[in-house]
Image (spheres, rainbow, N blue to C red):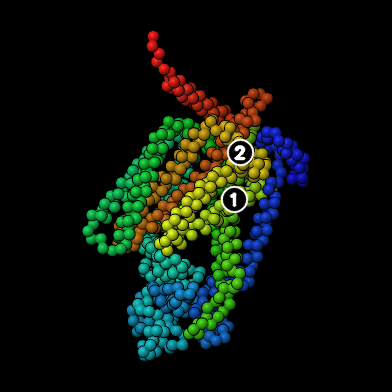
């Protein structure tokens, strides 16, 4: 009824006059066609989920299966033409790869024979006698089913029917019951082949496996630093900002110095003979150069913007005052992250179920493989679009919720009586009126990210072939253009969501009104707002600096084990991602406040008839900024007039 009751206002909006800002006066359902399109799209995703459950073999995915079509841990039906199929594997619940350290993929299938065993060998087995002893003591037979354990050492060709020696120690992976080798080299090769990207994942997984405790500790450190940084911004003062900037400068210089020192130490070390140490040295050189450039740029920006520190602190204090009216805003990233994790797990489960949807087919040696059904590849692409679109939709809902909460608290006349449950109110408005707007904004991001992903795939393919330099250059330039477009669209979407929360208009109208209003009022405190975003970005950099420093100190003690530079890069990326998740709330609130302030100036003049919605503290802050801008403009005009004055003779 509320959607229908607002239809009489549509005719007024169609009149080609300047749009009137009406903060929270009325609501109507916006972009309903896009919401219906998203519903149809998710109907297709639901069909794919149902098809994956019906046609996919979830038992083969969860419990694993051997090379002869038997699902481990279950009683199986025989497959025609496969003599070793149809066995009772109730007591054999673990999947064992006979050649786990030398897996290869040939014709999209593993070259190693896979068996169902009772238990995984937890100690290394070097001879067939030890394999035989393990079978007799544990009842776990590691050779092909039709070979008796007594014949392990009797038949001449037993080594072809048994695992390749030495058999590495392994443990069963929780839930999926795969025997995973525990030595770093075997683990990295094993995992990288299963994921089907040997060249890149071998280095990453090998380094992570050799230093997994260090990686886990660094991730926990990044999480703790992000929490500390969030509370620092929550109770920020001028002294804290100066200490914070000093720590940033020292951290940047210290990390750069440590990187160059480590590189010099590697260069002077004449005992470097291992390939891993050489790769560590190359990565250190790259890290040192990149960190030096970033440090120089950030130091220049800090020096240029140093005079805006006091005003930035006041702006962040105003932001904290807006957050204090609804402190649960700081928990929004946690809820969003939990929802995203749930959706990603569901998405991966459906994808793996689709991968197991196939018909049994007997190949050479009496082994069984499952051919994927026709049309599965098209479902994979549809499923991938669903991943990107839905993820962006969830993130956009968080942005809309935070913006709606700020709008509700800002456009409240009685500041001493804040609105009750503004977050729940913002959520209800989002789900009742503006889901279509969020769907449309997230679709625009998806439409940019998909061609960018395709271009990145083309670029990597051309790079592996070592030819087509012009094509690689063109694809890389297109990727950069799409990246810039993605960043611009994200900023446009944020302003459009805030305008929708204020005015209740559709996405395109909100984006257009926001651009006009911000361009009109950009002279007020754009520089202070930008420096506020810059300070928040420095908070993320500080978290990354301390995490990387801890990683450098920890990994340097094990420099000969594996290539640790790539795991360190992944840890740095994770630290930035966690810091961004926690501090993004401050950025969203800051941008929403800027737009609310611009709307307040547009609709009110501070008189008794049209008083401002902003409180006295915010109003004093705006007056100080106007005074500084007027003084700067006056000085600029005086300098211009002095430069244009010519000396005349008396």
Q: Where does residue 14 sit, x and y in percent of width and height? A: 73, 39
* Residue 514 image label: 2
Q: Nearer the viewer, residue 87 or 422?
A: 87
Q: Earlier in the sequence, mark 1 or mark 2?
A: 1
Residue 314's place in the image compared with 546, above or below, is: above
Q: Quadrant of the C terminus?
A: top left
Q: Nearer the viewer, residue 161 or 518?
A: 518
Q: Nearer the viewer, residue 429 or 69?
A: 69
165 vs 51, left or right, is left
368 vs 291, left or right, is right
Q: Where does residue 291 sit, x and y in percent of width and height? A: 36, 47
Q: Secondary structure at mark 2?
A: helix
Residue 305's place in the image compared with 545, above or below, is: above
Q: Nearer the viewer, residue 338 or 195?
A: 195
422 vs 160, left or right, is right
Task: Give the residue at x 65% y 30%.
Answer: 603
Count residues near mark 2 (Cα–Cα under 10 Å), then give few for <14, some for 14-19, many for 20+. Answer: many
Q: Where does residue 215 sit, x and y in percent of width and height? A: 40, 57
Q: Secondary structure at mark 1?
A: helix
Residue 90 at least partly seen: no
Q: Which residue is mark 1?
A: 444
Q: Where does residue 8 sit, x and y in percent of width and height? A: 77, 40
Residue 374's place in the image compared with 621, above or below, is: below
Residue 445 at least partly seen: yes
Task: Give the residue at x 35% y 83%.
Answer: 128
Count residues near mark 1 (Cα–Cα under 10 Å), then give few for <14, some for 14-19, many for 20+. Answer: some
């Amino acid at each position: 009824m509320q959607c229908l009751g607002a239809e009489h206002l549509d005719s007024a909006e169609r009149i080609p006059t300047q749009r009137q800002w009406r903060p929270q006066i009325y609501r109507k359902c916006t972009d309903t066609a896009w919401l219906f399109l998203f519903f149809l799209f998710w109907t297709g995703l639901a069909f794919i989920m149902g098809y994956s459950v019906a046609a996919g073999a979830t038992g083969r995915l969860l419990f694993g299966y051997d090379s002869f079509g038997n699902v481990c841990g279950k009683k199986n039906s025989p497959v025609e033409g496969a003599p070793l199929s149809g066995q009772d594997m109730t007591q054999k619940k673990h999947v064992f790869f006979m050649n786990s350290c030398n897996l290869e993929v040939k014709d999209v299938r593993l070259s190693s024979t896979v068996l169902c065993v009772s238990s995984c060998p937890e100690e290394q087995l070097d001879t067939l006698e030890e394999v035989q002893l393990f079978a007799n003591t544990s009842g776990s037979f590691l050779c092909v089913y039709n070979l008796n354990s007594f014949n392990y050492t009797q038949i001449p060709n037993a080594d072809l029917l048994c695992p390749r020696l030495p058999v590495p120690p392994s443990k069963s992976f929780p839930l999926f019951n795969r025997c995973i080798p525990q030595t770093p080299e075997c683990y990295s090769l094993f995992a990288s082949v299963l994921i089907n990207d040997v060249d890149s994942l071998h280095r990453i997984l090998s380094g992570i496996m050799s230093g997994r405790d260090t990686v886990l500790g660094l991730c926990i450190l990044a999480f703790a630093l992000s929490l500390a940084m969030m509370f620092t911004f929550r109770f920020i003062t001028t002294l804290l900002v100066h200490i914070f900037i000093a720590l940033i400068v020292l951290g940047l210089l210290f990390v750069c110095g440590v990187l160059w020192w480590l590189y010099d130490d590697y260069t002077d070390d004449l005992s470097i003979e291992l390939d891993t140490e050489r790769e560590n040295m190359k990565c250190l050189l790259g890290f040192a150069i990149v960190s030096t450039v970033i440090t120089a740029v950030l130091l220049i920006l800090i020096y240029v913007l140093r005079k805006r520190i006091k005003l930035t602190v006041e702006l962040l204090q105003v932001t904290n005052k807006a957050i204090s009216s609804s402190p649960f805003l700081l928990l929004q990233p946690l809820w969003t992250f939990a929802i995203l994790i749930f959706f990603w797990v569901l998405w991966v489960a459906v994808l793996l179920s689709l991968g197991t949807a196939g018909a049994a087919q007997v190949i050479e040696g009496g082994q069984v493989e499952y051919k994927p059904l026709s049309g599965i590849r098209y479902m994979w692409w549809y499923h991938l679009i669903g991943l990107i679109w839905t993820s962006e939709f969830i993130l956009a809902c968080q942005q809309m919720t935070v913006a709606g909460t700020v709008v509700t608290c800002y456009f409240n006349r009685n500041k001493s009586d804040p609105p009750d449950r503004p977050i729940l109110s913002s959520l209800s408005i989002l789900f009742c009126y503006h889901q279509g707007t969020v769907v449309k904004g997230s679709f625009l991001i998806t439409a940019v990210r998909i061609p960018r992903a395709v271009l990145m795939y083309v670029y990597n393919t051309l790079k592996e072939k070592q030819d087509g330099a012009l094509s690689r250059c063109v694809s890389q330039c297109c990727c950069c253009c799409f990246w810039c477009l993605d960043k611009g669209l994200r900023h446009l979407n944020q302003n459009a969501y805030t305008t929708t929360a204020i005015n209740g208009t559709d996405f395109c109208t909100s984006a257009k009104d926001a651009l006009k209003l911000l361009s009109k009022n950009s002279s007020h405190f754009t520089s202070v707002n930008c420096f506020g975003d810059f300070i928040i970005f420095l908070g993320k950099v500080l978290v990354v600096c301390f995490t990387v420093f801890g990683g450098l100190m920890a990994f340097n003690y094990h420099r000969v084990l594996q290539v640790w530079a790539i795991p360190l890069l992944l840890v740095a990326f994770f630290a930035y991602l966690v810091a961004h998740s926690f501090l993004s709330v401050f950025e969203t609130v800051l941008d929403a406040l800027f737009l609310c302030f611009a709307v307040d100036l547009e609709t009110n003049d501070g008189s008794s008839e049209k008083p401002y919605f902003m409180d006295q503290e915010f109003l004093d802050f705006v007056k100080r900024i106007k005074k500084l801008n007027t003084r700067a403009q006056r000085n600029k005009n005086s300098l211009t007039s002095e430069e244009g004055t010519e000396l005349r003779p008396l």
